Amino acid sequence: MNSRVDDLRRLISQHDHAYYVLDDPKVSDAAYDALFKELLEIEEENPGLITPDSPTQRVCGKAITSFKTIEHKKQMLSLQNAFTEQDFIAFDARIRENLQIDVVEYSCEPKLDGVAISLHYKNGILSHAATRGDGLVGEDVTHNIKTLKSVPLKLLGNNYPKDIEIRGEVYFPKHQFNKFNKVLLSDGRKPFANARNAAAGSLRQLDAKVTAARPLALCCYAVGYSSADLAELHSDILDSFIDWGLPVSRYNSIAIGVSSVMDYYNNMSRQRDTIPYEIDGIVYKINSIAMQNEVGSIARSPRWAIAHKFPAKQEHTTVAAIDFQVGRTGQVTPVARLDPVMLGGAIVRNATLHNMAEVWRKDIRVGDTVLVRRAGDVIPEVVSSVITKRTDLMHKVASPSICPSCDRRLVEVSDETLRCPAGLCCPSQLKGALEHYASKPAMHIEGMGPSTVSILVDEGMLNCFSDIYKLEYEKLLKLEGFAELSAAKLLDSINSSKKTTLDRFLYALGIAEVGKVTAKELAQSFTSLGALMLADIAELESIANVGPILARNIADFFIDLDNLAEIKSIQDLGLVISRPILKIDMISQILEGRVFVITGKFEDYSRDEIKMQLQQHGAKVAGSISSKVTDLIVGSNPGSKLEQAAKRGVRIIDLESYEELIK
Ligand SMILES: [Zn+2]
């Protein structure tokens, strides 16, 4: 009986670890439930066998009546903040000066926006868990922490100190947060303002059953007190966390020197919205524990670590006016002109209000104080008005009846959505179409952003796409804002953009509803522009994701004689479309088990092409160097990844060896 109980506990813990820490479940829910039920039944019949680390003890019976306090064995420090790159450069300079070294190796880690927690393990068993509190004394939340399936009740293996405090962050996963708030709303309860509040609120429950019903998760990042010495590098200590079954962020990385640290920061900043938890910055820690000790701490903050915060993504400002803009499809969009405000690292002066229905629904008025938000790279938007600051002076705006760009009468396409019917005869639509054509995912003409397009259209130099290829150096020089260098650069960029791919060109043409993904699918299916132009509706509809409306849009576009003449002009002016790489199913498994990272630039391939080819041979492709990575493919001008890879003993492959590899 005893040994069966041990077996069951070990199996359940292993499955919890696989599911909640590794995100790689090994058994079905039903099989798991059966194991759990068996253990529960044995324990019910033999209460003497129950131990605190038994998985059945994650939720204890009774709710507590109040929170006790717990003294941390080692103070929980809080980090100093860096708000700019310069702040970090100064920090790095102080460290180098202090240690008399030329370059510092940092452990770089995402800074989770959750609740800091200290887990105390004695002889590998979770004895208690406490919040940060004032850093010296925190609140005992053991009963709630035990309900988190990603928290091991017993550490794996046996190579851990007898007495150790693990520091980490409890968070509410992003994808669960909205779902959870919806449930609260439908129950007539108040939703949480953000995921961090939801995590904090969930931990502050007297009844562990409430916490157990919420999807909290843990991420560990440091050691507090330890009865034994650990590894000499912080990154190696985090690796031992993994061996002990503790969850660690998979975005952690090592960076040597300032520029490599900034690469990491920029990379994470770009990925921010795709990371499954909220992060509000990056933490840099000196990786050598000996150096950490040498540098020491001041009062409540370590001198060997700093948190580099991401710029705020929500701010308050005032609506100076509400204008109407006409986009490339003719749709009229209300835009709030704002008093300038710093948002996400840039000054924001305009924010979209999407459509009139939205303006009415949110009741945004001129003069209002509003909350403005920016998520990732998207256009800033007005979230809401601050009603408490509203006075009689703030007024509503009416829907326009004529196009603000060409004075044509607007047509209502659907409820509250207005459109200018003038097409490319409307200067705003022409500008929008040209900007789209020149944009990065389309023809990628550098130096042809909105302001340049606007000047060129206003000067009458651009009336259609093909005019781009007729621009002349001498004429450009006469325009305001152009110097010899910028004019030459623009023409260079136009010239090199002529060599393109079918999907880019299709996307650039701006056919209604043809986005990047559709353009790629069309290019994969038809492989040449000529074939696509000849395709009938039935052929178009046979492509995945192309429905009747889209097929009709495409066919109509290529029947239009003006469009055909325009495409011919562009081709006559030197456009060269290369044939797309075909999507082929798995070719072989020769690279199975290998994990590749790609860095640098490649003349003949895009990174996506290389990625696809590797995957076709069974390899995995990762975004950053980690212990799982086996190979690094290096093009010209590689970044810090090369350094990191070399240090970790990752195999380095150049283009030639790569081509050899996939042959
Ligand atoms: Zn118009």
Image (tube, helix red, strand yellow):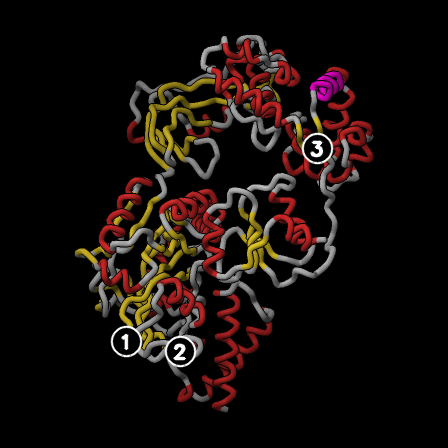
Can residue 404 be seen? Answer: no
In this orientation, which residue lies closer to the viewer: 535 or 490?
490
SS class, disc 3: helix
Q: Which residues are magenta?
A: 563-573
Seen in the picture, residue 484 relative to 140 is either above or below; the reply is above
Q: Is residue 135 above or below residue 456?
A: below
Q: Quadrant of ligand 1?
A: top right
**Residue 125 relative to residue 603: left or right:** left
Q: Which residue is mark 2?
A: 159
Of label 3 and label 1, which has the lower sequence position?
1
Residue 267 is situated, as x and y percent measured from the top left of the image, at 46, 45
What residue sits 65% from the left and 54% below the top? 615
Looking at the image, residue 448 lies above or below residue 16: above
**What's the distance in space between the residues labelled 2 and 3, CA to CA?**
57 Å
**Residue type of the residue flagged with mark 3:** Leu
The magenta stretch spans residue 570: yes
Label 3 belongs to which residue? 502
Report the Cα–Cα distance between label 2 and label 1.
Answer: 13 Å
Q: Name which quarter of the figure residue 210 lies in.
A: bottom left
Q: Secondary structure at mark 1?
A: loop
| The stretch drawn in magenta includes residue 236 | no
Q: Report which quarter residue 135 is drawn in.
A: bottom left
What residue did someone put label 1 on? Answer: 227
Q: Nearer the viewer, residue 549 or 65?
A: 549
CA distance for labels 3 and 1: 63 Å
* Mark 1, other Cα within 10 Å: few <14 / some 14–19 / many ≥20: few
- Location of residue 314 with respect to 363 vertically, above or below: below
For marks 2 and 3, the one nearer the N-term is: 2
Dominant secondary structure of the magenta stretch? helix
Secondary element under disc 2, as helix, strand or loop, is loop
Name the residue type under label 1: Ser
Would you say the residues marked 2 and 1 are in contact, meaning their CB atoms lie under 8 Å apart?
no
